[in-house]
Image: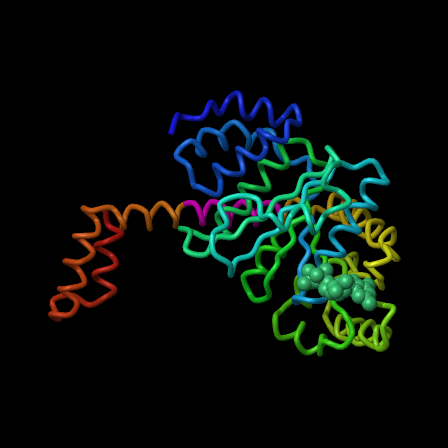
Amino acid sequence: MPEPDVERLVEDARAGRARAVGRLLSLVEEDSPALRRAIALIAPRTGAAHVVGVTGAPGVGKSTSTSALVGELRRRGRRVAVLAVDPSSPFSGGALLGDRVRMGEHATDPDVFIRSMASRGHLGGLSWATPQAVRVLDVAGFDVVLVETVGVGQSEVEVAGAADTTVVLLAPGMGDGIQAAKAGILEVGDVYVVNKSDRDGAAQVRRDVRSMLGLAQRPPGAWKPPVLGTVATRGEGMAEVVDALEQHLEWSRRSGALELRRRRRAREEVEAIALAALRRRWAGSTDRDRLEDLAGRVVAHELDPYAAADRLLGD
Ligand code: GDP
């Protein structure tokens, strides 16, 4: 494959050309050797986008809500990118056919960009790939990058929780309160949304979540996550959700929380890149032989596993 002209790609992405944005995201997905140069050009020009994580159990209405949120953001004139990440699915290697279908009404809007990523079996997984993909969308000038996690579990919560603002979606009839508490999502939400508020039990879920959040100790001046109700299928309540996202961003800027969160994200990003590099090194033939040799010596009781790990890390 010819070496991609990354300078050109980055320039075109900054000019808002969707094809270039798509190519750069493919470099991320493929973990291309050219990615390093691309990110070196991109990283200093990022930071303007509002990164919003959307998480919640399957069936609560995440994709319907994301689409409705895109609609509300477009009404406010924002350019919006959606990154749907699924840590538990096989690596997709590009946009899914479903993207166009599920975001049907926005598919032809040039100011909306939609892309799915999955990464099982990928070195470093989504903790490595997601922040790079977000950087690409940020440099492309999207005002808001919605990172929607598709599955459910700890890794989804982590991916969504690394955003500037995290939206946790719930819905009645899903045993939500307990489920949410178990998955740890009551710790990461900045905005809680009880979707399917046209159904019985929605008010009860809102009360449950409010009382669970009320138990948490908050220092004075801390952000108090609102608990909102929506009917995503009818677009109801979306204006309030977008208002809350904007208020949270505003509070984060003022309080310094944004800087702290972005620092945490960068810390995790650097760590993920370093770990992926180490794994790649160990997968190389010389180091693989060395690892084999060390494993043999552990089995033969010549070395204990900690001492073996020290040697592996040693040089
Ligand atoms: P996801 O799995 O979380 O992405 O959920 P989807 O967005 O695919 O929605 C799951 C189902 O719930 C679909 O059949 C939607 O039409 C339906 N749904 C989504 N939002 C609402 C809502 O506000 N009210 C009702 N009654 N159904 C909804």
Q: Whole-percent x and y of residue 156?
A: 58, 60
* Residue 194 at least partly seen: no
Which residue is painted at 85% across and 54% down in the image? 235
Above or below 49: residue 311: below
| Residue 130 falls left or right of residue 244 | left
240 or 90: which is nearer to us? 90
Which residue is painted at 72% across and 71% down in the image? 216
Which residue is painted at 80% across and 71% down in the image? 210
- Indicate yes or no whether the magenta region holds residue 270: yes
Q: Whole-percent x and y of residue 230?
A: 84, 61
219 or 273: which is nearer to us? 273
Q: Main secondary structure of the magenta part?
A: helix
The image quadrant where one finds the N terminus is top left
112 or 38: which is nearer to us? 112
- Ligand 1 lies in which image quarter? bottom right
Which residue is painted at 60% across and 52% down in the image? 162
Segment colored magenta: 262-273
Above or below 85: residue 115: above
Q: Whole-percent x and y of residue 165?
A: 70, 51
Q: Whole-percent x and y of residue 271?
A: 45, 49
| Residue 142 falls left or right of residue 118 | right
- Indicate yes or no whether the magenta region holds residue 131: no
All told, the count of numbered labels is 0
* Residue 106 at least partly seen: yes
Above or below 49: residue 212: below
Give the image's coloring scheme. Answer: rainbow
Above or below 258: residue 214: below
